[in-house]
């Protein structure tokens, strides 16, 4: 190293050079960090954009929309079952053993002048009923005594023992009559078990779905009197695939004790017989390998909100063409389950909230029941209209209300009032019904053994004619007796 100049100047010169080098290095480092940060931000933005587009693409895939609609449909079903389970009246009646005692009076008015005697007679009667239900032993009995101030006029006894139904009406026909068996034992219906069964059906259905077989299109449909532009995600099963799905469902049911015993109770058969019963029901569907069964999920074009979920198919049934659709539609406070076959439809429609205020319409080919509910903790009130198309009674309409009062953990009383107008093909009249009801779950139900009975189809026209004549004669006699008593008073 060469030394030039004095030491102080030399040190100053070296310090300056070192500072310049340090500053340059710091500037380069800061620039690199800045560039790196910018690159990271760009990468993150690019990743976010790509991820967003990937997410949008995923959310718009027909499979995703289909699964979403299926889940929404199932969740609505569960919500309805939960609402039924939490209803106060249902909770009182859904015990292992229940006795329901009811004392009812009618106040009929506005009958035709020529029927005034019948009106006065019917208003003089009281109706006392006792219903006992043992859910565990699958037994129900109902006895209705129709009486005036002095005598029992009719005793009506109805018994449902393990899915076998009998009825007897004293003074008309003094033997029990064996009635046709219902398809389902309604006393055994259980909303919570329905949800569990629904889980099984949904699980088996999801197992057969293959990603590559989903299809997508668009369609405008009408729901609750509004037209909605929809994306439609569809999945189609042929007859063989549909048959396999049902076989899987049957096997899953019989291998699950909860579903097995629940459905056996509903059909009134032993658990060991259930698989054969379900297979018989499957065979009645007459599945055709050449028939396509199309499941469709309708979601709103702009929000992907579920609008409808449906199953449709066309097939031959007993040589006749069948075009059938089973659909569930939903909206804000709106639910519609509809079965349409060759242009004829049956449906259940719920508007509002079952846990609060709702209107329920049940429509079939020959009847429609429309009623509203205003449900509170211990009371309910609303309107009711029943319209019939194949009956001498054309319609029944009016209001109803009930109030429940708890008296203990096992007993409650209920007062029921109904104000109805009954319209027939010839006239109309008003009926007020007042009933005091006691519900007691702290009981033991004793079965009535029925050994003497006759099948309904063994009762000929002569017996039926005799029963009707007995009824008319008895009614005229009692009516005349009532008139005489009124005159003496």
Image: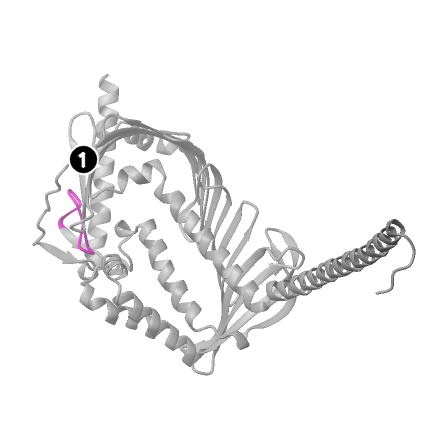
Quarter of the image that includes the N terminus: bottom right
The image quarter containing residue 241 is bottom left
Helix, strand or loop for disc 1: strand
* Residue 300 visible, this orientation: yes
Report crowding for label 1: few under 14, some 14 to 19, many 20 or more residues within 10 A (C-alpha). some
Residue 459, placed above or below residue 280 = above
Which x, y percent locates residue 434? 33, 28
Which x, y percent locates residue 61? 60, 68
Q: Nearer the viewer, residue 483 or 437?
A: 437
**Residue at image location 37% in from the left, 59% down from the top:** 199
On screen, residue 274 versus residue 322, left or right, reads: left
The residue that mark 1 highlights is 153
The image quarter containing residue 96 is top left
- In the rendered structure, does residue 166 fall within the stretch colored magenta? yes
**Residue at image location 46% in from the left, 51% down from the top:** 76
Quarter of the image that includes the C terminus: top left
- In the rendered structure, does residue 459 fall within the stretch colored magenta? no
Which x, y percent locates residue 424? 42, 43
Look at the image and give the residue range highlighted in magenta.
160-175
Q: Nearer the viewer, residue 9 or 164?
A: 9
Task: Looking at this view, name the residue that lies furthest to the bottom.
Answer: 290
**Residue at image location 55% in from the left, 65% down from the top:** 64
Residue 62, placed above or below residue 475 = below
**Residue at image location 23% in from the left, 30% down from the top:** 409
Q: Main secondary structure of the magenta part?
A: strand
């Amino acid at each position: 190293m060469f030394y030039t100049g004095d030491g102080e100047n030399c040190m100053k010169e070296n310090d300056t050079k070192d500072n310049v080098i340090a500053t340059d290095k710091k500037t380069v480092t800061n620039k690199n960090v800045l560039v790196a940060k910018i690159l990271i931000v760009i990468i993150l933005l690019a990743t976010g954009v790509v991820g967003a587009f990937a997410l949008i693409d995923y959310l718009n895939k027909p499979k995703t929309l289909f699964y979403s609609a299926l889940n929404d449909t199932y969740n609505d079903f569960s919500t309805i079952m939960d609402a039924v389970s939490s209803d106060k009246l249902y909770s009182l009646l859904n015990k292992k053993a229940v006795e329901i005692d009811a004392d009812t009076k009618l106040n009929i008015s506005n009958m035709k002048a020529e029927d005034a005697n019948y009106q006065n007679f019917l208003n003089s009667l009281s109706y006392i009923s006792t219903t006992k239900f043992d859910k565990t032993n699958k037994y129900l009995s109902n006895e209705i005594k129709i009486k005036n101030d002095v005598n029992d006029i009719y005793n009506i006894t109805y018994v449902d023992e393990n899915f076998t139904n009998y009825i007897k009406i004293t003074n008309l026909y003094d033997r029990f009559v064996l009635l046709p068996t219902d398809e389902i034992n309604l006393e055994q219906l259980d909303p919570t078990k329905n949800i569990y069964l629904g889980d099984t059906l949904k699980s088996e259905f999801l197992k057969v779905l293959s990603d590559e077989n989903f299809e997508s299109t668009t369609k405008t449909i009408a729901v609750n009197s509004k037209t909605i532009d929809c994306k439609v995600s569809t999945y189609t099963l042929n007859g063989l695939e549909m048959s396999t799905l049902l076989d899987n469902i049957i096997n899953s049911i019989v291998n699950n004790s909860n579903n097995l015993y629940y459905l056996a109770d509903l059909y009134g058969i032993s658990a060991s017989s259930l698989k054969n019963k379900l297979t018989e029901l499957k065979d009645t569907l007459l599945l055709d390998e050449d028939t396509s069964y199309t499941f469709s999920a309708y979601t709103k074009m702009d929000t992907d909100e579920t609008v409808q979920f449906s199953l449709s198919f066309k097939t031959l049934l007993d040589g006749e063409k069948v075009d059938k659709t089973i659909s569930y539609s939903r909206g804000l406070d709106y639910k519609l389950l509809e079965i349409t076959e060759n242009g004829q439809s049956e449906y259940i429609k719920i508007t509002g909230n079952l846990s609060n205020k709702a209107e329920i319409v049940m429509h079939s080919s020959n009847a429609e029941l429309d009623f509203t509910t205003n449900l509170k903790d211990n009371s309910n009130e609303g309107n009711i209209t029943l319209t019939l198309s194949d009956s001498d009674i054309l319609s029944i309409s009016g209001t109803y209300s009930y109030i429940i009062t708890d008296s203990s953990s096992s007993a409650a009383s209920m007062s029921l009032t109904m104000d109805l107008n009954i319209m027939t093909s010839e006239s109309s009249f008003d009926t007020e019904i007042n009933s005091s009801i006691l519900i007691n779950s702290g009981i033991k139900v004793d079965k009535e053994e029925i050994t003497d009975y006759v099948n309904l189809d063994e009762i000929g026209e002569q017996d039926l004619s005799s029963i009707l004549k007995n009824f008319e004669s008895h009614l005229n006699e009692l009516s005349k007796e009532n008139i005489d008593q009124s005159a003496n008073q």
